[in-house]
Amino acid sequence: MQEKLEFLRREALEALEAAKSSEQLEELRVRFLGRKGELTAILKQMGSLSAEERPKMGALANDVRGFIEKELEVRGKALAEEALARKLESERVDVTLPGSHRELGHKHPMTSLLDEVKEIFIGMGFEIIDGPEVETTFYNFTALNTPENHPSREPQDTFYFSPDVLLRTQTSAMQARYMETHKPPFRIIAPGRTYRKDEVDATHSPMFHQIEGLVVDKGIKFTDLKGTLDMLFKKIYGEDTRIRFRPHHFPFTEPSAEMDLQCFNCHGEGCRMCHGEGWIEMLGCGMVHPNVLRICGIDPDEYSGFAFGLGTDRMAMWRYGVSDMRLFFDNDMRFLTQF
């Protein structure tokens, strides 16, 4: 039995030194020390020994067991260190090499302009509100004093889901929604996307961005509207900016006007950008029609107000000197990275 135990010691040592992985070590542990392993098989022969030999063989068997367990531990640590060394070598990074350049994103020019406009209005005491893009005909037209026979309500001009539901043609619908649930005085702007059946060209798109503004209080006059818009465009385009108002008609304002911006390219002389007129149409505006106030539960004999709706797409065109609105939405990085 002594010879078998010594042979087992040598055999285990050779096998452990030849092991190349932790999986092989586990197989060897089971082979030599498991319940059905080689050491257990030898110990089962203890019954055939004399009483004098049993203690000696038992001590030797424990020594062999301890030896194999220690070698298993030593070889396991060695294999772990080798694996770590290989991993470090394979994942080695040369810190002297130059780093990889990562392009950083930035705001879309339309978003940058909208944020700037919001900050200007916040500075003038306005609240920013938001509303649904899928709107009802009541809020989009009826509550804004737009009669049923008005051309803007025709299917060829508007995207309808049903006779009473449509994609909003203007953020003006937020006027009625806000006035229904709030009492004056208030100052609000409602920025967002709007939709009309326009043909796509350099200055038109079936989807465009608009900011609707509304002020209702006692004693509001047209001069308040003019001063507000004059302040806005001077903040955006510079203190030498000039604006003008032309009489117009909108069903939801009375009196109504179109506001033009003097062409910053030719300063009123006339050029390709302003189509030779010297002025660029920017927005529609006017004093809130008494019927709109009345429909929304506000007494027009006590309160008055002004409203305006401006397209931020065209504002961005003039602000950045872009002649074609489609460039903002083509997702051409060569264009967008300029801003």
Image (cartoon, helix red, strand yellow):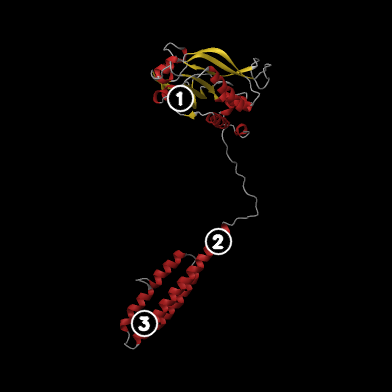
**Gap between marks 3 and 1 measured at Cα:** 100 Å
The relative height of residue 61 versus residue 143 in the rendered view (above or below) is: below
Is 339 placed left or right of 21 in the picture? right
Residue 140, image x, y percentages: 43, 20
Amino acid type of the residue tagged 2 in the rendering = Arg
Residue at 46 percent across and 65 percent down: it is: 22
Give the alpha-carbon distance from disc 1 to disc 2, as whole Å.
74 Å
Q: Which residue is mark 2?
A: 86
Q: Earlier in the sequence, mark 2 or mark 3?
A: 3
- Label 1 sits on what residue type? Pro
41 to 288, vertically: above or below? below
Mark number, residue 58: 3
Q: Quadrant of residue 330 in the image? A: top right
Numbered mark located on residue 185 in the image: 1
Mark closer to the observer (1, 2) = 1
Query: Residue furthest toward the top?
Result: 149
Distance, label 2 to label 3, CA atoms, is: 42 Å
Q: Earlier in the sequence, mark 1 or mark 2?
A: 2
